[in-house]
Image: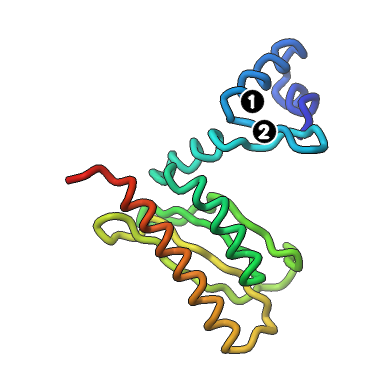
């Protein structure tokens, strides 16, 4: 989104809009891309994750889940749960993925918090042409990444 699009969408005066975006950029809530557009910054992403008690996962997830997408050649989603429903926090899309494709096979891998309860999961949408061996390898990679994310939650938990 450009700053002008943001100003128009929020119905702000130009000077107010530019000042607000500058302040958000300084604090890391938005970042400027190489083409001059704005995107969610690291503080904004962590803030969004924190709404689900997962703020400490944000930076680790950026690296690990982009890597998992590339290694597994899968679309990877991180979904938070309150125990009843799941909410998609972020998706790392595989180059081949198209939203208009019919239902794709999905692998679901839980992420546990201290105490063992599931607080999030990984959803991997995989290419329907993968053989069983490739699916098993993808699942093994996803389980390792989920374990690392769970470890991050445990490391950040207050000592009892």
Up/down of 26 relative to 79, above or below:
above
Q: Residue at x 51, y 46 (%)?
A: 59
Residue 73 in the image, given as x and y percentages of width and height: 66, 70
Residue 107 in the image, given as x and y percentages of width and height: 53, 73
User: Would residue 5 be found to the left or right of residue 121 on screen?
Assistant: right
Up/down of 48 relative to 85, above or below:
above
Q: Residue at x 68, y 77 (%)?
A: 127
Quarter holding the N terminus is top right
Residue 160 in the image, given as x and y percentages of width and height: 17, 46
Q: Residue at x 31, y 53 (%)?
A: 154
Counting the numbered discs, the total is: 2
Looking at the image, the residue that sits furthest to the left is 160
Disc with the residue nearer the chain's start (2 vs 1): 1
Towards the viewer: 31 or 83: 31
Q: Residue at x 54, y 53 (%)?
A: 88
Determine crowd level at label 1: few under 14, some 14-19, many 20+ residues with C-alpha closer than 10 A.
some
Q: Tell me, what colour scheme is on the image?
A: rainbow
Circle 1 sits on which residue? Answer: 25
Please tell me whether mark 1 sits on a helix, a strand or a loop.
helix
Towards the viewer: 112 or 155: 155
Please tell me whether mark 2 sits on a helix, a strand or a loop.
strand
Residue 94 in the image, given as x and y percentages of width and height: 70, 64
Contact? badges 2 and 1 (CB < 8 Å): yes
Circle 2 sits on which residue? Answer: 31
Up/down of 154 relative to 20, above or below:
below
User: Would residue 73 be found to the left or right of residue 115 on screen?
Assistant: right
Up/down of 109 relative to 87, above or below:
below
């Amino acid at each position: 989104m450009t700053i002008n699009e943001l100003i128009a969408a929020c119905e702000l005066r130009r000077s107010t809009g530019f000042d607000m975006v500058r302040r958000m950029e300084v604090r890391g809530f938005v970042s400027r891309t190489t083409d001059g557009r704005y995107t969610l910054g690291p503080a904004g992403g962590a803030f969004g994750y924190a709404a689900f008690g997962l703020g400490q996962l944000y930076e680790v997830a950026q690296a690990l889940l982009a890597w998992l997408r590339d290694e597994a050649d899968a679309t990877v989603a991180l979904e938070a749960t309150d125990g009843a429903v799941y909410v998609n926090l972020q998706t790392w899309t595989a180059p081949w993925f198209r939203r208009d494709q019919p239902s794709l096979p999905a692998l679901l891998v839980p992420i546990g918090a201290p105490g063992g309860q599931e607080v999030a999961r990984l959803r991997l949408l995989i290419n329907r042409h993968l053989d069983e061996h490739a699916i098993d390898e993808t699942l093994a990679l996803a389980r390792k990444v989920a374990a690392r994310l769970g470890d991050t939650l445990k490391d950040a938990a207050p000592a009892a």
